Amino acid sequence: MATLKGLLIQRNTAVPQEENLEKGYISSWTPGSDFTNFCNGICWTAPANGAALIEIWGAGGSGSRMCCCGDGLPGNAGAYVKKSIQVEQGDTVTGCTGMPCYAHPLCFSGCSNATGVCVVTASNGDLCMCAEGGRGGTSFCNPNTHSLYCCFRANGFCGTRCRENYCGVICNHCSGGWCAFGYGGDVCCCGAVGCVSFFGCYPHCKCQFQRHVPTPAGLFAEEGALITFQTESDGTPMANWSGNQLFQFYAALNSTSRAPRMGTPNSYCWRSDRSCGCYESQGCANYLPVGVGGIGPQACPGVRDHGIRGGFGGVRIKFLAD
């Protein structure tokens, strides 16, 4: 018997055929905002006997506030955990999605929350999975006569000096700091670390900084991605204003996808084109995909700036019936 799909293809050979669609029924959860989080957690019930692939991401670490004469590091990505299990009809997966910290505290925003789930099955026992949230980026105020690279190294951050004039790469890992870990899965990936290449030696050499923002594993790539972008260069109208890096970051973030789209907000926060300007409310807004680290601040002389809040935690379950 002819099917409707077959008839449509016969009559219109120009209709594209999608051959690589993922099989199964997919359910996913992530908070839309602080006010639409799942107050009582999430709950999934197996509709039939089959296989469930469970993936969870911890919330990404957030950037931090800085003003006038400093700069900061991006937050680290959340951890990623994946597990495949056999389920029977009525088995359940319950849990909570992690929330990222606000990006408005001065110097350090703290560590974002973990995402955790518990799987209750009738025949295969119970298990728990946890993906920790990423560490927030640290910021420092620094006079214009000192190297930011040296400032971070003096405070115990990991770094690699690459020039004789005290420039180099600083990563968001220090004594007492840690990476986000994952537990309970067939695959457990730690959250990647955010970095900044301070190729200009002074805090106001923004055009010579390169920022490296991590995404978690299992999002854009099996082991995650590192998004590198450079702050707007001197000679442009926006070069001397705080907050003008969001456009560059979004352009690089979109290029990570196989189907990139711009869709970026303007980022000239000195005239409040960016949502809520670039002050306290800005550090509460959510712009980023699940588990992605938030960019640090770009403060300029006489102006403060916030980093961007990290991405929410998330849960994804793909179910294939027997």
Image: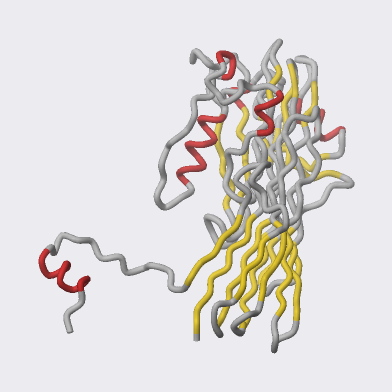
Q: Is residue 285 above or below residue 77?
A: above
Q: Position of residue 297 (x, y in %)?
A: 68, 28
Q: Is residue 150 visible?
A: no
Q: Position of residue 163 (x, y in %)?
A: 69, 32
Q: Work out which residue is located at the far top of the displayed protein and give it.
A: 302
Q: Is residue 306 above or below residue 49?
A: above
Tell me residue 83's x, y (percent).
64, 73
Please tell me which residue is depicted at 75% across the width and 15% down the height of the picture.
144
Residue 257's x, y, as percent?
46, 50
Q: Is residue 149 visible?
A: yes
Q: Is 222 on the left or on the right of 300, as rendered? A: left
Which residue ends up furthest to the bottom in the rendered image?
Answer: 123
Left or right: 190 in relation to 86: right
Q: Which image quarter: residue 10?
A: bottom left
Judge by depth and name the residue closer to the eye, 126 or 20. 126
Q: Nearer the viewer, residue 221 or 94?
A: 94
In this picture, residue 10 sits left or right of residue 104: left
